[in-house]
């Protein structure tokens, strides 16, 4: 009797593990497409609470390491320096750096002044990469 009970318990646990494994495999098969669609559409923007000094430093660093054509010359995001557009210009530069470096969270850290968003921050002629 004891061996029949032990065999029954072993079968029960084996079936439970098999079901758990099947559910996990099904979830894993569905997850990559969901994860990929979200991770392929992210942008790095400046934290609204960041200081002007930090934003200027971010702008200089990001443009020294990536393409900032969008905020220079006749780029769609080039604004005069004195019109309050520093957060936008810094965001465009930070995003250019973030995109060029592979969209890793650490490439948007900027000493705590960068934020990753899933909402496209583009506006008007200012298009984010």
Image: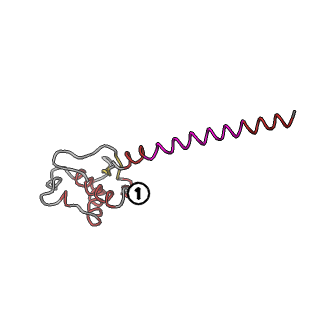
Could you tell me which residue is drawn at 40 percent across and 48 percent down? 36
Task: State which quadrant residue 58 falls in.
Answer: bottom left
114 lies left or right of 83? right
Coordinates of residue 105 in the picture (x, y in percent):
40, 54
Please state the horizontal and vertical placement of residue 114, each as a whole percent of the image. Answer: 35, 52
Picture coordinates of residue 122 (x, y %)?
A: 23, 46
The residue under label 1 is 106
**Which residue of the protein is positioned furthest toward the left in this rendering?**
74
Q: Is residue 70 above or below residue 20?
A: below
The image quadrant where one finds the N terminus is top right
Q: Residue furthest bottom?
A: 64
Give the quadrant of residue 20: top right
Q: Residue at x 52, y 41 (%)?
A: 26
Q: Main secondary structure of the magenta part?
A: helix
Q: Nearer the viewer, residue 93 or 102?
A: 102
Highlighted magenta segment, given as a residue range: 12-32
Q: Is residue 45 magenta?
A: no
């Amino acid at each position: 009797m004891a061996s029949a009970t032990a065999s029954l318990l072993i079968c029960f646990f084996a079936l439970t593990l098999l079901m758990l494994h099947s559910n996990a495999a099904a979830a894993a098969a569905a997850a990559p497409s969901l994860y990929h669609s979200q991770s392929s559409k992210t942008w790095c923007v400046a934290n609204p609470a960041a200081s002007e000094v930090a934003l200027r430093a971010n702008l200089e660093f990001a443009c020294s390491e990536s393409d900032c054509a969008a905020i220079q010359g006749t780029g769609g995001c080039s604004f005069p320096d004195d019109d309050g557009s520093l957060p936008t210009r810094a965001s465009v530069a930070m995003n250019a750096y973030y995109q060029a470096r592979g969209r890793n969270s650490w490439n948007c850290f900027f000493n705590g002044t960068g934020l990753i968003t899933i909402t496209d921050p583009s506006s008007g002629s200012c298009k984010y990469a």
